[in-house]
Amino acid sequence: YTLECSRSGGPVLAALSNLMMLGKDGFRGLLSHCLQMSELMRQKARDLPWLTVLNADNHGSVVVIRVYPDGVDADSAYRAEKADASQRSALQEHNRFNEAVYMSTRDAAESGDSPVFVQTNRYRGTSYGEPIVGIKFFTLSVFSDPESIDRALAALVKARDKVSKAQAKT
């Protein structure tokens, strides 16, 4: 435990053990691999017109995305939604869409059919005070590889299609 007995010291000792076992270069290699996989996710995501990367300038291992229904150019919609108060209703509708897509991936993950994504209810706020919902993808596993990135994007496609079909019925 830490000196004030408020937290377990286990994670710190695990990190130290890994550092001692792998050495600085080995540990750097693992971190570098995770960052390479997050960059690959960003690159592949840029090719999808219905998806925008919210943290494109971030060089960390977390990729935050936002998905849109058919007929919406993701990058243009996101730029308009975050800056223009007249886009409030579109922003709110797309927030609900992202929440539904996330819930679909979560249901699929619980049955083993999808990687795990995490929803952020307020990735950023708009200039007019509304929250922007995003979906996070973490590449912190040393087992992440290009195929796992493809599986993650395929899971998003499947979830997005499922949500779009359900909304078309209502």
Image (cartoon, rainbow, N blue to C red):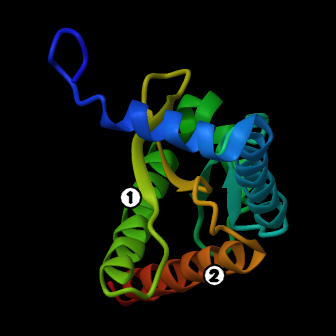
Report the front residue among 31 and 149.
31
Q: Quadrant of residue 102?
A: bottom left
Q: Position of residue 68 (x, y in %)?
A: 59, 64
Q: Going from the N terminus, do you reach mark 1 or mark 2 first?
A: 1
Q: Which residue is mark 1?
A: 96
Q: Which residue is pictured at 71% across the width and 79% down the height?
A: 150
C-alpha gap between disc 1 and disc 2? 24 Å
How busy is the neighbourhood of tag 1: few (under 14 within 10 Å), some, or many (20 plus)? few
Q: Is residue 101 left or right of residue 2?
A: right
> Which amino acid does the dot numbered 1 rest on?
Arg
Q: Label for residue 151?
A: 2
> Which amino acid does the dot numbered 2 rest on?
Arg
Q: Is residue 3 left or right of residue 81?
A: left
Report the front residue among 25 and 163.
25
Q: Position of residue 74 (x, y in %)?
A: 70, 57
Q: Quadrant of the N terminus?
A: top left
Image height of 132 relative to 35, above or below = above
